[in-house]
Amino acid sequence: MSEKLETPSTDEASNEMERTGLRRLLVRGGALRSALLPILAVFTALIIGAVIMAVSSPDVIAAWRQVSQNPRGALSITWGTIRDAYMALFEGSFGNPARIIRAIDTMRETGESRELLEALRPFSESLVIATPYIFAGLAVALGFRGGLFNIGAEGQLFVGGLASVYIGYSISGLPRYVHLPLALLAGMLAGAIWGAIPGLLKARTGAHEVINTIMMNYIAFRLTDHLLQGPMARPDRLPITPEIKPSAYLPSLLPRPVRLHVGFFLALATAAVVYWFLWKTTRGFEIRMVGANPRAARYAGVHIIATTVLTMALSGALAGLAGANQVLGLDHRLVRAFSTGYGFDSIALALLGNSHPLGVVLSSLLFGFLRGGAARMQSVANVPVEIIRIIQGIVIVFVAAPAIIRAIYRLRVVREEETLLVRGWGS
Amino acid sequence: MPPVLELRGITKRFPGVLANDRIDLTLNEGEILALLGENGAGKTTLMNVLYGLYTPDEGEIYVRGAKVDIHDPNDAISQGIGMVHQHFMLVPVFTVTENVMLGVESVRAGVFLDQDVAAARIREISSRFGLEVDPDAVVENLPVGVQQRVEIIKILYREADILILDEPTAVLTPQEAEDLFEIIRSLVAQGKSVIFITHKLKEVLAIADRITVLRDGRVAGSTACREATEASLAKMMVGREVILTVAKTPAQPGETVLEVQGLHVLDDRGSIAVNDASLHVRAGEVLGIAGVQGNGQTQLVEALTGLRRVERGKVTVLGQDTTHATPREITELGAAHVPEDRQQDGLVLPFPVGDNLVLNTYYVPPFANGVVLQQNEIDEAARERVERFDVRTPSIFVPTSTLSGGNQQKVIVAREFSRPIQLLIASQPTRGLDVGSIEYIHQRILHKRDEGTAVLLVSPELDEVISLSDRIAVMYEGQILATLPAEQATRERLGLLMAGVREASKAQVPA
């Protein structure tokens, strides 16, 4: 619709709605509207995942070979396979509700908490997986909001982990309230520097941040290898760093085997801070302005170079926190390849979450639960873990190509700018 | 003989809007029909229905008396209907021939493009209709006016005999527009029929045989061109009497606010765009800069507002040297800038209207307290500005992209005019706007002048410069050829200067 249609001026009713804040929520956040697509994308991906499970299951195939003799059987075996797989996925990611309830009763009666902790373990594991996703997803999302495509979250995560672990093991005798913040800060700082370099190159010379963040990734990976083989290796020369001092641990919340630690809540708090920063502060406004229209931002007096560097530095700091979280909360030392691509997956998460902190948290939880339940799905329902990867991939395709979902569910196109990603590659 | 094209009762609804409401329209053979209406009146929607881009909810289309169904542009083309869009659909890196044959390629032996055959046909079309163009030129190197000719050739190449031109003059210089009118006359002289969409009254009277006016999705009236006047058409378009000339009292100039001496500025390609320009603007007067687009006005304004580097020369605002100041420093001195390209420079379109209303003041109290935005203050100011400047928007929270062009411009005007300013630099402030909005923005600019603001107005529309300015400077190839008091600036004199004809030195008033 190239011709804009004049809309009537505000009438009293809508003024009333504005005052009540209801309209504000619906119009400004557009929360419901922007959540619809990702939700449908996940839903559709789960259905397609089910189809793939069915057609790749030997039992189901065998049953359909004899469909003429036993059509009802074929259907029920198909249905059963899918149901078992998704049940296992659910129990693997959230735990078995019946078992949890029983465990609560046991603890009430006997005071024995072991069984409850065991029952809660799947849920906790999902949250543990989701935690670095949240940090790294926020990193990429913040970059997107500023019009920058930070593909370097993985490298920033590595240097963040390196800096945190170094502070963690090399200093001793500090109380936790000094040591832990120091270690976290070191991780953020390292990530920030790693992000700021491509930011500066972009702002000063126009070198595209996609290329430079990828290059910075390689430097980070090889730097890690180098440090683990010498300067930071354990005294026995294994390519592992020494263990960090307990005073630098992100404390666990419950006894083992529950691994959930404070990092998860730190991630949630960080998401809130990122939201506040982007939407409630002048710096955040500047970042979003530069992201949405750099020419207008310049017209409005925003310092483009400083803002670009700041955006990349903050994005890097968040990714660095993801690395710090892993070494301070879980591993307590740094091993080779200690991240299994969290930084890369986070690009997908930022897309899925519409580059909004809340969206990032929700999509990170989704990926956490999918990943957390995958193992049980394999062991119980005999469905390969890779199915989860496939489902994740389909979700991303749908989110990246919303026209497919709109066509399936016959959704109307919602105005023009519905999501803000990145400016063109050539810009 | 039946009309070559007839629309009966076309109705098109969009969610919440009736874009076209039972529209009847007739086009006779060899006729130029002007479709006139404000932005948002439904002109483009109607033409998109005709071209098969939208399916009408009701109504019928007849071509040469026969009812036709048009589902997509291919149907339209096979009925001999061709459309030149407002934004050209050309591949910049292709040659004219490649662009024209795209989609209807001539081939040899099934696979090899036969550019010679196509080029020959293009030459034939060009000479027949006076559409001068080099078939081998690469499109991105051609001036806009010539690119438009390529678009017209494209549809003639496809043997269209009903041509729809959507706001064809919006991107053209006055001279290019004249050339286009010649082309259109030659088209109808050879039996083609043309629908000419516009919101410019002068053009309609210059070119059309008949005029159909749309307002709010309905036909507000149809008239033969010779019976219409600007005033009668404006009234039909807007639905009320419109003041077309601006009533203006004599200026009361005060101290000099903006002073420019020997300014040199380069364009993006590094060639000289502003060449030794000097001018000054005093408080309470409007200095208009006339000139054909592309003679350095854009770079001049960018240099004055801190968006482009000054190579040589000096700029002072209120006695302060701003030659190398940043946009923010200049803004903070009390300068306002209405930029030439509002969507690119003046607004962040995906942002809510409210945010755009504080786009350059978000960081000062009361809108910010330290680094924290004061959303309530921002919303309150935004509501007040929307009200005071009559911005038509359902709320201050909708994305600015959903507003019409006129209302987007009002957002910029509201933002720039609602803070205390000593200097206003307005670049093409009414470009692409409808009559009602132009009237409004002109009044606002003069109101600012009367409050004692120094106004620098840059516009390629000579009428606008003449009606608003107290003094007029003419820019040609980066130089200011002359600065004339408004009472001495006749259209003829300005026209000659705009074409680069220098006057005898005695007539030059020092800038």
Image: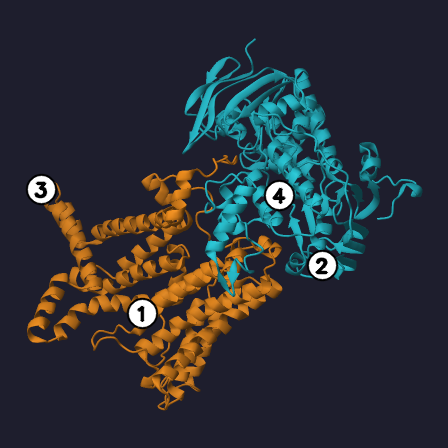
Chain colours: A orange, B cyan
**In this figure, which residue is indicated by the disc labeled 3?**
A69
* Residue shown at the point (37%, 77%) measured from the top left: A336
Q: Looking at the picture, which amino acid does disc 2 mark?
A: Arg
Q: Residue B205: x and y, percent?
A: 68, 22
First in sequence, mark 4 or 2: give its number: 4
Same chain under badges 1 and 4? The reply is: no
**Quadrant in which residue B114 is drawn:** top right
Q: Looking at the picture, which amino acid does disc 3 mark?
A: Gln
- Disc 2 from disc 3: Cα separation: 83 Å
Q: Chain of mark 3?
A: A
- The nearer-to-camera label among 1 and 4 is 1
* Residue shown at the point (57%, 68%) measured from the top left: A200
- Mark 3: few/some/many CA within 10 Å (<14, 14-19, 20+): few
**In this figure, which residue is indicated by the disc labeled 1?**
A264
Residue B16 sits above or below residue B258 on the image: above
Using the rendered image of the protein, determine whether residue B257 is visible from the camera's viewpoint.
yes
